[in-house]
Image (cartoon, helix red, strand yellow):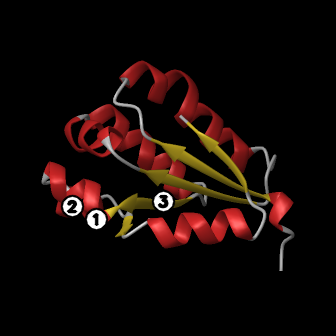
Amino acid sequence: MIDGKEKLVVVWTSADREVALKMVFMYVFNSKLKQWWDDVTMIIWGPSAKLLSEDNELQEYIGKIKKEGVKLEACLRCTDMYGVTQKLEALGINVKLMGEPLTSYAKEGRQILTF
């Protein structure tokens, strides 16, 4: 098992497209590509779910992130509220209730960044 300190969880909540493209996505992608972290999980939560469902460029980028080996998860309550659950699932994102998983990630000592 990888020590929790070698695991990164990025919680992306911002509906700001520039934040996604110029910070969150670049960091998450390179974290895995350049092996800065052994294990990288990205959680799409809140307004970011709606933004991702509407933006083709972000969808293409999320495909590259997934292909690099980043685990992609999204909050089911949020995706249901925005009516985008099926759209995110079609992108290969694991949509589920996220309260307990995020709590578990924190308790096991993963590094958590929020944007």
- Give the residue type at disc 2: Thr
Indicate which disc residue 72 carries.
3
Are the two marked residues, 3 and 2, in contact with CB atoms closer than 8 angstroms? no
Q: Marks 3 and 2, Cα distance to the nearest angstrom?
A: 13 Å
Residue 50 in the image: state x and y as whole percent.
24, 42
Left or right: 67 as drawn, with respect to 16: right
The quadrant where residue 109 appears: bottom right
Q: Are marks 3 and 1 in contact (CB under 8 Å)?
A: no
- The type of residue carrying mark 1 is Glu
Q: Are marks 1 and 2 in contact (CB under 8 Å)?
A: yes
In front of the other: 72 or 74 = 74
Q: Position of residue 102 (x, y in %)?
A: 56, 63
**Labels 3 and 2: the sequence-earlier one:** 3
Q: Is residue 65 placed above or below 109 in the rendered structure?
A: above
Label 2 sits on residue: 85
> On residue 110, which mark appears?
none
**Label 3 or label 1, whichever comes before in sequence order:** 3
| Residue that carries the numbered disc 1 in the rendered image | 89
Instruction: Identify residue type, mark 3.
Output: Leu
Q: Residue at x 33, y 32 (%)?
A: 57
Q: Farthest left residue? A: 83
